Each structure stands twice: as C-alpha cells, then as structure tokens.
Amino acid sequence: MHPSVMNVVLYYLFSTIYICYSKGTINLLENVSIPAVIAFGDSYLDQGNNNYIKTITKANFYPYGKDFVDGKATGRFTNGKSLADFFVKALGVKEYLPAYLEPVIQDHDFQTGVSFASGGTGYDPITPKITSVIPLSGQIEMFKQYIEKLKKMVGEDATQIILTKSVYLISASTNDFFISYSTVPIRKVEYDVPTYDKMLVKLAVNFVQEIYKLGARRIGVLSGPPVGCLPAQRTLAGGALRTCSEMDNKAVQLFNAMLKQQLQFLASSLPQAKIAFVDFYNPLIRIIEAPHQYGLEVTDKGCCGTGEIETLVLCNKLSTTCHDDSKFLFWDSIHLSEKGCDIFVNQVLPDLVTNLF
C-alpha cells in the first residue's frame, strides 16, 4: 500500500476511535470513519473566505471574534466559534475548520477539510451578485482546485478515500429569502413564493449533484432557518412589536418541505449517496420559544449594538456589546452567537449522524 494511502487509512481509523470513545461526543458506530469535513455556502459556514475577496460582506474586525482564540476576528460571522467549528469538533475531525482561501494551511489541516463558504451567497444566482461574494459555482471551482491539490499531496487513491468518506455541509438559502426575494423587485415580479421556492430547491439539488459528481457521498444540507425571526427581519418586517414575520417564515417552511422531499428522492437515485436534510428551522424555533431550557435569555435581539439591526459593518468597534453573550441566541442581528451555534449543533447532530452513516 502506498504510504500516503496508509496514512489516510490510519488517520480515519484513529478518528473513528476518537468519535466513539471521547468524552462529550456522539457514540457513533465503530465502523464510522470521517477523514474530513468540507463546507459550502453562506456566512453560517464561512470561516474567513470573504477576507480575501473584494466585498463589504466581511467580519474580520472587532467585535467579531472577541471570544475566539486571542480575541481575533478571523472572518467568522460570530463572536467565537462558528457552526462549522462545532460540527467539525463534534464529528471528531479537528478543533477548527479553516477557510480554503487562507494563505497558509498546514498539509494535515488541508487534508482534514476546509470551508469554501462565502458569507452573503445563496442558491439564487442574483444573491451573490448583490453582495459581491463567491457564488456557489465559484465554490465548486475552488473544490475542484482542492481536489487537484489533494492529489499532489497524497496521491489519487488517498484522495478518493478522503472524498468519499468525508462529511459535506451546505448552507445557502438564508440570503435568498432575506436579501434577494425581499429587496429585489424583479424577483417578486418573476416569481410568487411557491415558484421562487421551487427554483431554489432545483438549484440546491443541482448543487448536490455537482459535488456528488466530484466524489462527495455523505452530504448534509441545512434547510432554511426561520428568517422571519432573525432580529434584523423582526425590525424590518415585524411591526412595532418586532414579532417574527410570518410571511417570511411561511416562505421558508414551504421551501424546507420541498427541499426535504427532493433530497430524499435524490438520495434514492444516487448510488452510495447518503444525503441528510438538516433542519435549521424547527430547532431554532424551539430555542426562540423556550430560551431558558437552553440556558439562554434573549432570542429577539443580537448581542452587538442595539441587537435590532446591527450586522457586518454596522457591528463594529464603536458598537457596544451585551454584558454576557452566552445568554444570547444571536450575536448580531442575523448570525448566531457562539453559544447559539453550540446549542444548535447539539440539537441536530444525532439525526445528521444517523442519516449519513
């Protein structure tokens, strides 16, 4: 056996032992092996790729990252660890998931997965144009580059092992609802809600098929979150009382129902594919409605500034922050706090693991 192949085999065997027996992790089956986690999509999984492109959709400044290692703003759209970090740690792969565009990534860290996600993108091709970020098509191209680099590092056979045994995460619908359908007049002229949802689902399915063709087999697709309950959308569309926008939430619910059905059909039609629908909606609704059950206190505002509208450049070093961000579900008016990320991943991990393995 080629040494590179042997190294990969040994690594994911040790990963299996770690996942099965380390304290605080899910007790997976003993034959589970996860050599890497690879992420695509938007700001929920962007680990800093937007730092290296020309866009204002960035989070590489204080107070973002204030609770991260050394208080460093890395480009993660939260105060500390992101959803991607909690997923990669819970799956026993490593502590943090790096951004693909980071200038320096150690070979071992590169081989155990990266994020191609770009905050502000979406399935709708208009969405990344509005926010000037990396579209999903561009993330596919980066994935192809990643594969070629892996082949040079570990060889063809070991690369194939990494690709087929890894877990892939996709989160990409939030900005389509929050930005494109809400603010681009032509979208509402061209599509009513059901037809817009149908278009997004088709694009989501196409994306899954694209990464499948490139070797992905274990794929987790996050549904749309309750966009109408994001603090910013409460402010913009929730009236004087800042209630959740039911119109927005119903649009997302329809999308989620259609997406779940189509992913189930897709999984049955692709050989060796394991495709998990990761519910991003109902777990957040449960947390929002009963925060104290999760050790939280505030779910209608973010920690940054007033918490009602500040995000991205509006959440900056001049903004005050809440006294204890561990009591807030949201960090800014769109993105989850580190605590919120932790709670959410713990909510969905058992189903993710069951469906992918």
Image (cartoon, rainbow, N blue to C red):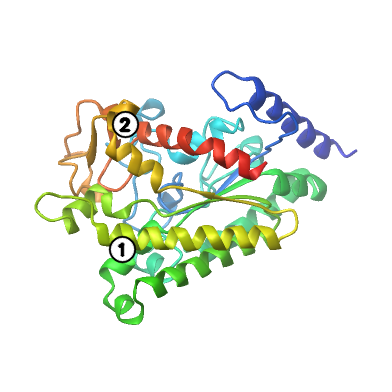
Element type at mark 2: loop
Picture residue at 33% right of the left edge, 36% below the top: 337
State the quadrant of the N terminus: top right
Closer to the camera in the image, 8 or 192: 192
Picture layout, residue 345 above or below residue 59: above
x 43%, y 54%: residue: 42
For the view shown, which residue lies furthest in the right direction?
A: 1
Q: Find the distance from the CA under tag 1 to the CA under tag 2.
A: 27 Å
Q: Is mark 1 on a helix, strand or loop?
A: helix
Q: Position of residue 47 (x, y in %)?
A: 46, 44
The residue that label 2 is drawn on is: 66
Q: Name the residue under label 1.
A: 179
- The vertical placement of 17 against 211, above or below, is above
Q: How crowded is mark 2: few (under 14 residues within 10 Å), some or many (20 or more)?
A: some
**Mark 1 or mark 2, earlier in chain:** 2
Q: Position of residue 180 (x, y in %)?
A: 33, 67
